[in-house]
Image (cartoon, helix red, strand yellow):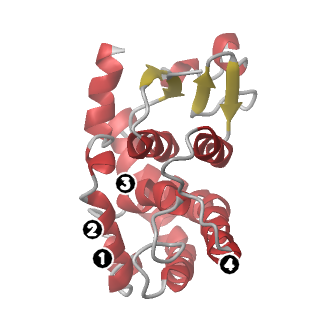
Amino acid sequence: MAGFMVYSIPGSPYGRAVLIALEEKGADYRLSPVAPGAFGSPEHMARHPMAKVPVLQHGDFMVYETQAILRYLDRVLPDPSFTPADPRAAARMDQAMNVNDCYLFNGVSNTIGFQRVVGPRVLGLTPDEAIIAAALPRGRQVFGVLAGILGEGPYFAGESLSLADFLLAPQIDFFRDLPEWADLGGPHPHLGAWLDRMNVRPSLAKTTWDMVAEMAKTA
């Protein structure tokens, strides 16, 4: 099987994680944009029963949930591999990915990121400062936990790039230009240095919100 289809929307950090992985693999792929109002359509529900993105199609095989997609890509496109061979490094990768899904996205990214970025840009909403303020204690905790996992190493699993970096970079990048960054990322300069290191990679430059929006126009 050759070629991949990614069902997603511009601005989705999870969709971007999949696109980053495909870029890093040098894979041939296409984006099929899903209109926000079409998430609950029968067509998309047949791809993802929980009406979310992204979904990956590879020939006649369909898979949803970002971690599952990333692991699938690393298995079917094993060179280069982004899963550490060392069990402890692999455990660090898994741990960071689960922190992303369970704690960073839920209650931080989907709150502060929505109020500051997604709501205003997509829906024309005004940020609710009370909601943002209420989410900050959890944000401080989660950023501290992630900074602890990263430690002084260059990447989340240690010396080598891993799937954890692909998953976390789009989420944390959401915060970089927000007023809350000083409170969340500021106390952890090594986390900021990691994000700088990620953002100069071509895979991230090619998958920004604006770049994916351009892909969507030509899909």
82 to the left or right of 204: right
215 vs 194: above or below: above
Q: Residue at x 47, y 71 (%)?
A: 133
Q: Earlier in the sequence, mark 2 or mark 3?
A: 3
Viewer-proximal residue among 139 and 7: 7
Whether the residues at callouts 3 and 1 have beta carbons within 8 Å, the answer is: no
Indicate the position of residue 212 as horizontal and vertical percent values. 33, 32
Q: Give the amino acid at mark 1.
A: Ala
Indicate the position of residue 163 as horizontal and vertical percent values. 54, 57
Residue 116's disc is 3
Q: Quadrant where the N terminus lies?
A: top right
Q: Earlier in the sequence, mark 3 or mark 1?
A: 3
Which quadrant of the view contains residue 196?
bottom left
Q: Earlier in the sequence, mark 4 or mark 1?
A: 4
In the structure shown, which secondary structural element does the residue marked by tag 3 occupy?
helix
- Mark whose residue sits in front, 3 or 4: 4
171 to the left or right of 61: left
Q: Residue at x 32, y 24 (%)?
A: 215
Read off the residue under disc 1: 193
Cα separation, mark 3 vs mark 1, equals 23 Å
89 vs 52: above or below: below
Whether the residues at callouts 4 and 2 have beta carbons within 8 Å, the answer is: no
Q: Earlier in the sequence, mark 3 or mark 4?
A: 4
Residue 196's disc is 2
Whether the residues at callouts 2 and 1 have beta carbons within 8 Å, the answer is: yes
Assess disc 1: are there few (<14), some (14-19) or many (≥20) residues with their C-alpha within 10 Å of its C-alpha. few
In the structure shown, which secondary structural element does the residue marked by tag 2 occupy?
helix
Q: Give the amino acid at mark 2.
A: Asp
Read off the residue under disc 4: 88
Whether the residues at callouts 3 and 4 have beta carbons within 8 Å, the answer is: no
Q: Residue at x 53, y 57 (%)?
A: 82
